[in-house]
Image (tube, rainbow, N blue to C red):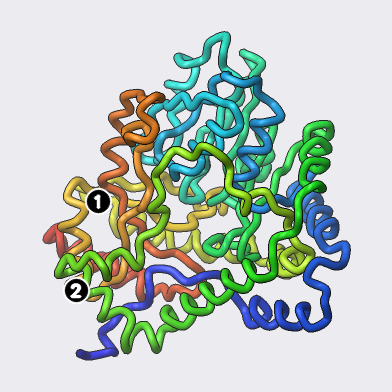
Amino acid sequence: MNIFSAPYPRSRIYTRFNSYGSFFKDLILNRINKGNDVEKFEKALADKFAVSEVVCVSMARVAIYLVLKNIIKPGQGVIMSPYTIADVVNMVVLAGGIPVFTDIERNSCNIDPNKVEQLIDDNTGAVLVTHLHGIGADIDNISKICHKYNIYLIEDSAQAFGGYKDGKRLGTIGDIGIYSLGMYKNINSWYGGVIVSNNKDLINKIRSEISQYDYLSKLFILKRMLKGLTTDLLTNPLIFKLLTYWIFRYGFLNDIKWINKKVEIELDLKLKKTIPDQYLTRYTPFQARLALLQLNKIDSDTDNRVKKAMFYYNGLKDIPGLVLPPLKSDSSYAYLVFPIQYKNRKKLLKWLMFYKRDVAAQHLKNCADLPSFSNFYRDCPVARKTANEVIILPTYPRYPTSEVEKNIKVIRAYFKLSSYSF
């Protein structure tokens, strides 16, 4: 085993020393739930994103639940992409909505605006658009459709925090925008989400409901931090190259399920009957202090990821067997990852792992095909195909450009193409 030939990890969480140290400082000073920092963060985000109303919530998926609960009537349809996590569909159902799955665009992996209007009827309450992988959906055309029929447009920007469209932040173009502040996002406060809107009455209703909740428990935050610390240690380049990578490489190449399950996420695909108590909690001032410290880094981090996306695009664009995402070099797309699609995904992934590259299959499913959501089944062939083909290439800020170049070279070698000149 040559540790110097091991790659950098496929992902690293966006943490700093204060992500951990400030918790224990606040715990000792008994100020986890004290201070007006939630309001400070909401005000700072409103100013930065040029939106009038901001409210923090426990999770981005809970934001979807709270928004829909307050804007649709029970039994109304919510047009949405099926290529998402199962819990997003659960939030629609628990809010009283009927998921109306519509197919997606192949390249962007986002909802297809050409299919949206066909599904609108007298029972449609809202359209939920996801800017997946940090790549903006065709929000202008969808917005025109929603205005035409006078229905709400919700932007799920959980993976697109900081992205732009014509000078406006993704999430501020529709009626309501939603962001994630969870552990794997580009602002990490361990848990959390944000709702933005210019609809003051709606935000006040949601704020009033949230005020009745208890704060997220200190023990829960601690458990999330310990999980994050474990992830940080195992993905530390030295430890990863010496130990972690070789274990997961062996597991993947030899199809050892108990090892492979350690890196799988979003395994709960069941239809929820009730919303978990843990979801209905308040965002703490401690979390807001963490988020506030990171807010001014989002644009520089996006610039960093865009440069890596441009490398990937230019290095892979001539490979006929690959489907690449659209390229925007002006930081309008956040590129949380760089998704590529290939029909023999597992074969390519095994090739990459064999040649010491650490990348992963996208974990999202085509929810329209899941047995748990069979009552809402709709044939979405592009989403079905996409769910079986997406590979996500790393773009996070600490990922070296030299690693991007190695990923490109190994992919090109798989297709028996000459090396790309960087």
Q: Name the amino acid type tagged 2.
A: Tyr
281 relative to 34 in the view: left or right? left
Q: Which residue is mark 1?
A: 318
> How far is the residue under mark 2 from the one under mark 1?
21 Å
As drawn, 404 above or below 123: below
The foreground one among 387 and 399 is 387
Could you tell me if the residues under marks 2 and 1 are in contact, i.e. CB atoms within 8 Å? no
As drawn, 264 above or below 365: below
Residue 159 drawn at (x, y percent) = 53, 51
Residue 72 drawn at (x, y percent) = 65, 23
Which structural element holds mark 1?
A: loop
129 relative to 337 in the view: left or right? right
Residue 178 drawn at (x, y percent) = 64, 44
113 relative to 183 in the view: left or right? left
The foreground one among 386 and 56 is 56
Q: Residue at x 65, y 70 (%)?
A: 219
206 relative to 100 in the view: left or right? right
Q: Name the amino acid type tagged 1.
A: Asp
- Outermost residue on the top side: it is 122
How many marks on residues? 2
Q: Residue at x 56, y 39 (%)?
A: 274
Q: Give the number of the disc on residue 245.
A: none
Please name which of the two marks, 2 or 1, marks the residue nearer to the observer. 2
